């Protein structure tokens, strides 16, 4: 008998000796947690790239973004911007139709949190808001400062940008872009 066969024989005898002891254990003990089969989704879903980043950010408003959205719109706007003020009623109206699938985040170019919050209250905006110059905008996956405002970019949950354009175009056609 070679060393390999001896090893397997000893191992088998050890397992047989341990079997009765394992069977005599407390049957009221909780069953060990089963591991998920490879390739199958687990019950607890990990947040997406954007969702995870959002969970680690600080927002100016009580409204926190949906970390489970499929798409995110980063709206760059400010209270002192005439075109931004002209578009905000449409943005607020469209946001109410987006549901949980699309989340809009205002990236305010205002100089203070008070100005940004006052701007949102003026239009009844109920979406998450950060200041562009606070450092929080750098945590948004695929975020780029716009050359001018109002501007919006739409990204998938994985952080891949779909479109970056004038805010009015993105907001008006969000349904079209959410199919890409």
Image (spheres, grey):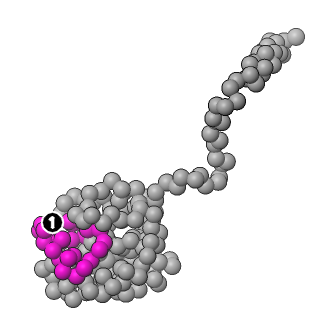
Q: Is residue 100 visible?
A: yes
Residue 63 location in percent, x, y?
Answer: 30, 66
Q: Which residue lies furthest to the front in this view?
A: 28
Residue 122 location in percent, x, y?
Answer: 18, 80
Q: Can residue 11 be seen in this view?
A: no
Foreground of the two, 58 or 49: 58
Residue 51 against residue 4 in the figure, above or below: below
Q: Is 151 displayed left or right of 5 in the figure? A: left
Residue at which label 1 appears: 113
**Magenta segment:** 107-132
Residue 174 location in percent, x, y?
Answer: 41, 82
Residue 60 against residue 18 in the figure, above or below: below
Foreground of the two, 3 or 50: 50
Q: In which quarter of the image is residue 145?
A: bottom left
Q: Which residue is drawn at 63% across and 42% down?
A: 35
- For disc 1, the neighbor class at 10 Å (few under 14, some 14 to 19, many from 20) is some
Q: Is residue 117 magenta?
A: yes
Q: Is residue 25 magenta?
A: no
Q: Residue at x 45, y 83 (%)?
A: 175
Residue 28 location in percent, x, y?
Answer: 67, 31
Q: In which quarter of the image is residue 91?
A: bottom left
Q: Is 5 displayed left or right of 179 in the figure? A: right
Q: Which residue is drawn at 41% across and 62% down?
A: 67
């Amino acid at each position: 008998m070679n060393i390999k066969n001896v090893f397997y024989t000893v191992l088998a005898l050890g397992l047989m000796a341990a079997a009765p002891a394992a069977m005599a254990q407390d049957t009221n003990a909780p069953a060990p947690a089963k591991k998920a089969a490879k390739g199958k989704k687990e019950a607890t879903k990990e947040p997406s790239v954007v969702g995870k980043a959002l969970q680690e950010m600080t927002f100016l408003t009580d409204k926190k973004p949906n970390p489970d959205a499929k798409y995110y719109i980063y709206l760059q706007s400010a209270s002192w911007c005439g075109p931004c003020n002209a578009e905000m009623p449409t943005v607020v109206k469209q946001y109410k139709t987006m549901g949980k699938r699309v989340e809009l985040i205002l990236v305010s170019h205002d100089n203070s949190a008070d100005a940004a919050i006052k701007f949102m209250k003026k239009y009844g905006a109920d979406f998450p808001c950060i200041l562009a110059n606070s450092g929080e905008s750098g945590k948004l996956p695929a975020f780029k400062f716009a050359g001018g405002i109002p501007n919006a970019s739409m990204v998938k949950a994985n952080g891949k940008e779909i479109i970056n354009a004038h805010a009015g175009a993105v907001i008006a056609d969000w349904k079209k872009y959410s199919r890409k």
